[in-house]
Image (tube, grey):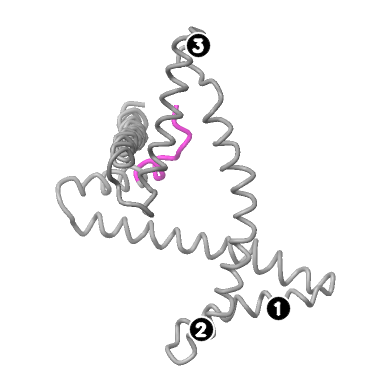
Amino acid sequence: MSTFSPFELWIMAFVTLAIFSFLYRDNPVYRLVESIFAGLSAGYYFGLMWDTVLMQQVVYPIRTDGAWYLLIPTALGVLLFSRLTRSYSYLSRVPLAFVIGSTSGVFITSRLQGLVLPQIRTTFMPQNIPGGSTDPGMIVVLSAIVVIGVIATLIYFYFSHEHKGALGVTAKVGIWFIMISFGAHFGYTVMGRVSLLIGRVQFLVESWIGSFTS
């Protein structure tokens, strides 16, 4: 049984049908709902940033703990808005340089420790076969495919030498692995969108239309 009030059900059904109306063509109803969604998202994130960042991490610490050093990152953040003016837009380079430099320093170490090295280690470990099979021959074949795929893909992105001979053949193998990976990701994305579509259709049929007979 739906936990929404009739008014909420009708609003949700109207918004859902308005989004689906884009399948016919672009129309004012779709643009109205799209604008409402963009406005609500902007308002929500502005309120979220105001409360969780500006108030909780700047204003309250300065008031209660006297953390005046927080005025330095606050001033850098304010300088980002100088890009809105043509005359003073050059001032935004200072906080941008600080953000890019600090982010690179933090992410290079964390990505190397948390992503690159574990992926290298996982690539050369025996792979698990879908379905839980423990056939040693299949494990060796699957592990060899993964190692060949990773090496061939990396060689495809090696542009210091022209892709000729063995290097060119390996790069072409890498292209096949890249295309297979893109296909798998595309299928996964489509499956996710279809799952969302099923959810909205299920809402219309069971909750909205079902409310007529309840």
Dot 3 amino acid type: Gly
Residue 145, located in which quarter of the rendered image?
A: top left
Q: CA distance from mark 2 to mark 1?
A: 16 Å
Residue 72: mark = 1
Q: CA distance from mark 2 to mark 3?
A: 58 Å
Q: Residues within 10 Å of mark 2 (few under 14, many from 20)?
A: some
Compared with 49, 170 (above or below) is above
Q: Position of residue 54 (x, y in %)?
A: 65, 69
Q: Secondary structure at mark 1?
A: helix
Give the mark, 2 or 1, whose residue is nearer the N terminus: 1
The reply to whether residue 153 is visible in this rendering is yes
The residue drawn where x is 33% and y is 41% is: 167
Judged from this view, the residue extending furthest toward the right is: 65
Give the extent of the magenta segment: 1-10
Dot 2 amino acid type: Ser
- Kindly report which numbered mark, 2 or 3, lies closer to the viewer in this rendering: 3
The residue drawn where x is 31% and y is 55% is: 33
Q: Residues within 10 Å of mark 1 (few under 14, many from 20)?
A: few
Give the mark, 1 or 3, whose residue is nearer the N terminus: 1
Judged from this view, the residue extending furthest toward the left is: 24
Residue ID for mark 3: 132
Dot 1 amino acid type: Ile
Q: Position of residue 36 (x, y in %)?
A: 36, 59
**Residue 64 or 146: which is nearer the viewer?**
146
Residue ID for mark 2: 82
Residue 3 colored magenta? yes
Contact, mark 2 vs mark 3 (Cβ under 8 Å):
no
Q: Secondary structure at mark 2?
A: helix
Quadrant that contains the N terminus? top left
